[in-house]
Amino acid sequence: MTVPVITLLGTTALLFDAPGETDLPTQQRIWALALEAETWPEVREAVPGMNNLMLAFARAPRNLDALEARLHQAWEAAAPLPLDGRLIELPVTYGGDGGPHMADVITHTGLGIDDIVALHTAPEYPVFALGSHPGYCYLGGMDLRISTPRRKVPVLSIPGGAVSIGGAQTGVSASSGPSGWNTIGTTAMVFFDPARDPPALLRPGDAIRFRAERVIR
């Protein structure tokens, strides 16, 4: 895809899919576009996703073509928004009962557990977007040497705090639920608390660094 694609979501919203790879510069342009679009009178909320932006309407636009043209123009003018978020360190116990699929990642990559942990804890992972379930963050920056395909048969329930790999991405479950990713560890960090303000621990522009608190072989 070389040009943006705009899709209506019923009469209440639209989805703007950005062209190009899912990488940090593209995501930073999406953040900038979100800030711009939120100032438009017909837009109630602008929600960044992975390589896309959802606009929820305050009222249905009378002239959809004009809105789409404005979106295209704003995208062309959007400069990558600099990262100015926090760096959050997450202590992780790798392997053992909390990392039931570590053996599958070892088998797929041909790497030992110490190498996998070293590669997983090395980067700072920028938070590209929030979604999937409350508090869950989509991260960029994982080393492709530990990329592992999603599971053919999803797990019916993994606990909150499960640290997993799915394809070229890694993430941390914010609450219990089904998953098709490979769980390699667990953290006690709480990512979503309705009594907290704001309820979600992380926001786009923040970054995560995993720290190996313990490795169970």
Image (cartoon, rainbow, N blue to C red):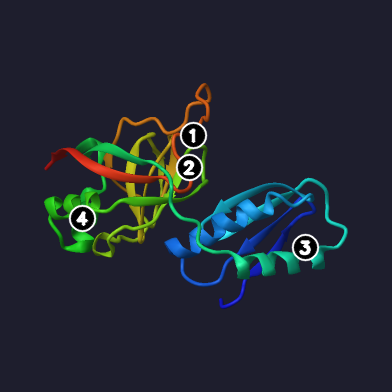
Q: Name the amino acid type tagged 1.
A: Ala
Q: Identity of the amino acid at label 4?
A: Leu
Of the two numbered discs 3 and 1 on the same chain, state the one appearing first in sequence.
Answer: 3
Task: Tell which circle, 4 or 1, labels the residue nearer the N-terminal end.
Answer: 4
Asked if labels 2 and 1 touch by Cβ distance under 8 angstroms, the answer is: yes
- Quarter of the C terminus within the rendering: top left
Q: CA distance from mark 3 to mark 1?
A: 31 Å
Question: Residue at the location (61% across, 75% down)?
Answer: 3
- Check disc 2 and report the residue beneath it: 203
Type of the residue with mark 2: Arg
Q: Which residue is mark 1?
A: 200
Dot 1: few (<14), some (14–19), or many (≥20) neighbours within 10 Å?
A: some
* Cα separation between marks 3 and 2: 27 Å
Question: x, y percentage for residue 4?
Answer: 62, 71
Question: Measured from the top left, where is residue 83 in percent x and y?
Answer: 43, 52
Q: Is residue 95 visible?
A: no
Near mark 3 (Cα within 10 A), the count class, few <14, some 14-19 or many ≥20, is some
Q: Are marks 4 and 1 in contact (CB under 8 Å)?
A: no
**Dot placed on the residue nearer the N-terminal end, 3 or 4:** 3
Instruction: Locate the N terminus and report the quarter of the image it occupies.
Output: bottom right
CA distance for labels 3 and 4: 44 Å
Residue mark closest to the camera, 3 vs 1? 3
> What is the distance, in whole Å, between disc 1 and disc 2 at their CAs?
7 Å
Q: Which residue is found at the position 73% from the left and 65% from the top?
A: 70
Residue at left offset 15%, top offset 40%: 215
The amino acid sitting under disc 3 is Leu
The residue at which mark 3 appears reads as 67
- Residues at badges 3 and 1 in contact (C-beta under 8 Å)? no
Q: CA distance from mark 4 to mark 1?
A: 27 Å
Q: Secondary structure at mark 2?
A: loop
* Mark 3 secondary-structure assignment: helix
